[in-house]
């Protein structure tokens, strides 16, 4: 298993690595005292910044392979005996790996500058409230929060805002969520990790829709949970399936994304919401409602199930990371009853508290008068991008590739010809300069077909036509099994 | 078990809660249409800000208990039927708790404004590079990092800096740490959590010094590990004890703070370093070196054991949270060989990546020309604070209360009369307006004596004399067992 860093190098890292390799070869194969290629040459050859070159040289200097003569340049150093590292003992110390790097979805790969990035889970900068974020950072820099420790549950004002976002619909008889029911989290993934660790024990079952968010499955596996998939219908799963799965698996948790489920974009119908909540209540289990796309509704607003939950059956996750800024890692868990304290303890033990700077910036942005207007522009931007990508998919992949056009979210879920080997297809699309998220990352078990997820919120829309034409033109490699 | 939030309310939260209680009682017991106490009255009675009052009122308005008549004030609302929440079902769903709120050290409690805060693990603002942090935030607000997603392993430049901080001493024959060996973490506690989860399996043993950092024990328990304590000598633990503990427990991890161990301030001698590393190597286990006080050395610099480790036996933790800003939660793990990838996968699954804003701020501050000067002023400030507190302890508690004056760190470890009930002593010191960290938080098993940890880096030094006089003057309550 390689370090993630080497799995997903950034373009800058790639250039730096190339330069370092070249200088190491040079230092290894040339006599001591010979002069290294000049910075100017290296900058030109590797399209890198002088800073990158300088860093590579400095590293070799630290390792004693190169010596710098001030004003005169860099030279191959006299050899110095260095031990060879031997990590063999770690094989015994570590034992077998529980969870490999392949647990990390390809959606986490850093964009390759030259490629069309349709793999990512994040929107493009022009869909973010960039101006508001920058202004909020400057304001935060002047406050005491810049150097203070935040309370473990989060800033009271931010907890109040998260609670107010889950107000009951109309004149509901449900007691509204209170700020005391809110725990601020350093991102939605942390929320998942803490919920799974806190509300279940290793060996317990957790029920998920199939396909579902790869990160939720990775967090569940890390918590030692058994993943029990149930089929997704054309919108949500069947309540009867859920009821059976609970009784046979003994699961106490059902993880789901009722709105624009990632990766498919499916939306639960009102009937499904009611039937599923009835099962949840009658079985005495938790629904972990991952409202990941709350700010990405296109054809209508979202009303979370958590807003109509009187008895704490819904454990609700809301993240601002994708809609405010990927660098402002702030999310919230809303839970009621004993579950709340269990989740709080797990998160506090895992990393104590969330940066007050990031909480202040998030609060500043979402309470700024400009936030509402931003959300309207975001909705319009997502709509035109979604419709353009759907049009291109329909044109190039045909009418059956797209089961439906999702009413929100960031992605389209596209069916490839049956029996396509999505791993090989992924390699070929990368060679063609297009980054996609392969379907197999999203299935708890064997994929039921060959799929790719395409993000319409990141790459420039004017590149959609060309990219989809290229993807559709690739030869579709067949699997041995005939299943994607 | 109560939510942490209610265990550790901030002063602001306390006032807000009092006001809300008062208004709830009012709304519950007075007829609909009766006018609420005015904001002016509430501000005066509860020494709270108008904003706090306004928020409490708004919450009751959202809950339908109070109605606002614009310009005319707030009134008790007409009753509305609301269901009573019933969380009883969760008792069955959750089962027994593994890990209670008492796993969280009292050191995490937010400072009470009026009290002398000697409990905390963090330095005062005047010991932080506040000006550098604010300037770095403003600079970061202008960069692309403000809205970008960071690579999962962290920003290359920051990884390079962390690696350079662990350079071998003199012309060592050890291959220096490379930036590729560095994983950026959202704080030291996250590093501990990921190391314990990634390098051991539930049920495995981890060896710790006794006493040791409560957060490390909480993280180990959360990972399902058995904690095996070994006694601390006057400085470090005995290598023979460590060897015995490894062979009898089968532990593959030894967690330790070789420099200014928290809470005692003990420093391993050169001989102990060599003997312990010899055991670590011969037994084929990991030393988890928590270099928490790297920037808090007072009487001499720190050279991490990780700098002299050829074969990846040392897994090294360095955090900037305490020395740059508690709001800039950035740390690093340095590990070599297969351990690195295991830790990276765990952290990525737990929360994907660290905010690029916080990484940029941390890098900006530690590479600023002003950083070195700040560290020198910090050292001088810590020295005078340490010496003043030690003087006061010697004067008021007598010569035996302090075993030694630590050469670095933020704390003194003070022995109370044998048989003192530290829980009751903690309550009395709080009533007397002094916050301390009780010894029992820091012992893996029964405390071997009655201790408190006093932080000399947070409260104002001119308050030390009065606070220590008060603490020494408190009656020392006896335990039933006669052990602290």
Image (cartoon, coloured by chain):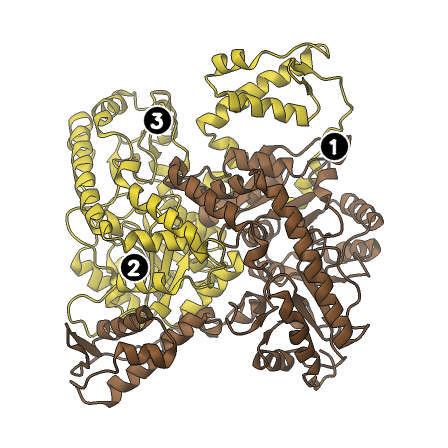
Chain colours: A brown, B yellow
Q: Secondary structure at mark 3?
A: helix
| Location of mark 2 (residue) | B242
Q: Secondary structure at mark 1?
A: loop
Q: Which quadrant of the structure image shows residue A122?
A: bottom right
Lower position in the chain sequence, tag 3 or tag 2: 2
| Residue nearest the viewer, comparing B139 with A303 | B139
Q: Are marks 3 and 2 on the same chain?
A: yes
A378 above or below A416? Answer: above
| Location of mark 3 (residue) | B425
| Location of mark 1 (residue) | A174
| Residue nearest the viewer, comparing B63 with A282 | B63
Indicate left or right for B479 with B234 as reference: right
**Crowdedness near tag 2: few (<14), some (14–19) or many (≥20) residues, C-alpha within 10 Å:** many
Residue B333 shows up from this direction? yes
Q: Which mark is residue B189?
A: none
B77 above or below B363? Answer: above
């Amino acid at each position: 298993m390689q370090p993630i860093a080497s799995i997903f190098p950034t373009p800058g890292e790639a250039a730096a690595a190339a330069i370092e390799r070249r200088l190491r070869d040079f230092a290894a194969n040339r006599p001591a005292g010979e002069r290294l290629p000049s910075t100017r040459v290296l900058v030109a050859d590797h399209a890198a910044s002088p800073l990158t070159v300088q860093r590579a040289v400095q590293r070799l200097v630290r390792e004693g392979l190169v010596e710098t003569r001030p004003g005169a340049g860099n030279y191959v150093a006299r050899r110095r005996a260095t031990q060879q590292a031997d990590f063999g003992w770690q094989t015994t110390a570590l034992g077998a790996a529980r969870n490999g790097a392949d647990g990390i979805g390809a959606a986490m790969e850093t964009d390759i500058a030259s490629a069309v990035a349709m793999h990512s889970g994040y929107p493009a900068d022009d869909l973010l409230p960039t101006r508001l974020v920058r202004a909020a950072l400057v304001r935060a820099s002047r406050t005491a929060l810049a150097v203070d420790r935040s309370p473990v549950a989060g800033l009271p004002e931010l907890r109040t805002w998260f609670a107010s976002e889950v107000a009951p619909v109309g004149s509901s008889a449900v007691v509204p969520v209170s700020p005391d029911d809110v725990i601020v989290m350093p991102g939605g993934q942390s929320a998942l990790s803490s919920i799974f660790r806190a509300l279940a024990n290793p060996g317990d079952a957790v029920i998920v829709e199939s396909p579902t968010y790869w990160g939720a499955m990775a967090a569940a596996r890390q918590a030692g949970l058994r993943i029990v998939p149930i089929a997704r219908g054309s919108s949500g799963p069947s309540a009867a399936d859920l009821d059976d799965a609970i009784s046979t698996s003994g699961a106490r948790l059902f993880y789901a994304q009722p709105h624009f489920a990632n990766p498919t974009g499916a939306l639960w119908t009102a009937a499904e919401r009611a039937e599923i909540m009835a099962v949840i209540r009658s079985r005495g289990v938790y629904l972990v409602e991952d409202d990941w796309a709350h700010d990405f509704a296109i054809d209508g607003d979202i009303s979370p199930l958590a807003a109509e939950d009187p008895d704490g059956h819904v454990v609700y996750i809301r993240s601002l990371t994708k809609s405010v800024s990927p660098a402002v890692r702030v999310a919230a868990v809303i839970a009621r009853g004993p579950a709340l304290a269990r989740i709080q303890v797990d998160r506090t033990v895992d990393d104590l508290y969330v940066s007050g700077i990031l909480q202040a910036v998030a609060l500043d942005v979402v309470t700024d008068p400009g936030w509402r207007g931003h959300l309207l522009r975001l909705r319009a931007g997502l709509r035109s991008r979604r419709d353009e990508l759907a049009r291109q998919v329909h044109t190039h992949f045909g009418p059956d590739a797209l089961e439906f056009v999702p009413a929100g979210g960031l992605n389209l879920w596209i069916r490839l010809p049956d029996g396509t080997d999505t791993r090989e297809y992924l390699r070929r699309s990368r060679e063609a300069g297009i980054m996609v998220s392969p379907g197999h990352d999203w299935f708890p078990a064997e994929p039921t077909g060959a799929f790719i997820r395409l993000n319409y919120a990141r790459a420039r829309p004017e590149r959609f036509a060309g990219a989809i034409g290229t993807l559709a033109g690739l030869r579709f490699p067949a699997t041995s099994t005939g299943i994607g």
